[in-house]
Image: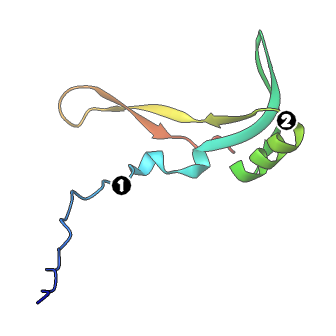
Amino acid sequence: MVSKPAEVQPIAGPKRKGRKSHESEASTTRFFMGDAGTDGISLQREFKSEVEAQLESLKLNQPYHAVESWKAVADLSNGSIAVEKRAFNSKT
């Protein structure tokens, strides 16, 4: 007589934490094509999305550049100074 194997219940693992809100703000990242030289990077053409920059990079066989904007803010709420970074929308 062959018995049915017992059902195995999956073990619940730890829940994954989501990203912090300031890390997920796409508006802080801007994408450009440009030239990288010994004196720095010359950003020449901006794209609306990373996908557009990737496609242009593929066509031209050149790297694209991503620029993030952050602003330092002092938090005095705990009686001491803590410096935090906050997303900064540089498109004004």
Percent x, y of residue 53: 77, 45
Q: Which mark is residue 61?
A: 2
Relative depth, front residue between 51 and 92: 51
Q: Is residue 18 above or below residue 10?
A: above
Left or right: residue 67 compared with residue 1? right
Q: Is residue 49 visible?
A: no
**85 left or right of 47 in image:** left
Indicate the position of residue 85 as horizontal and vertical percent values: 43, 34
Q: Which is nearer the N-term, disc 2 or disc 1?
A: 1
Above/below status of 7 relative to 86: below
**What amino acid is found at the position of numbered circle 2 in the picture?**
Asn
Q: Secondary structure at mark 2?
A: loop
Query: Residue 54, how many percent across, how many down?
Result: 75, 46
Q: Residues within 10 Å of mark 2 (few under 14, many from 20)?
A: few
Query: Please, what is the three-letter code of the amino acid marked with disc 1?
Result: Gly
Q: How many marks?
A: 2
Q: Nearer the viewer, mark 2 or mark 1?
A: 2
Q: List the residue tagged with mark 1.
A: 18
**Residue 48 visible in the current orientation:** yes
Residue found at x 68% / y 42%: 30
Snapshot quadrant of residue 89: top right
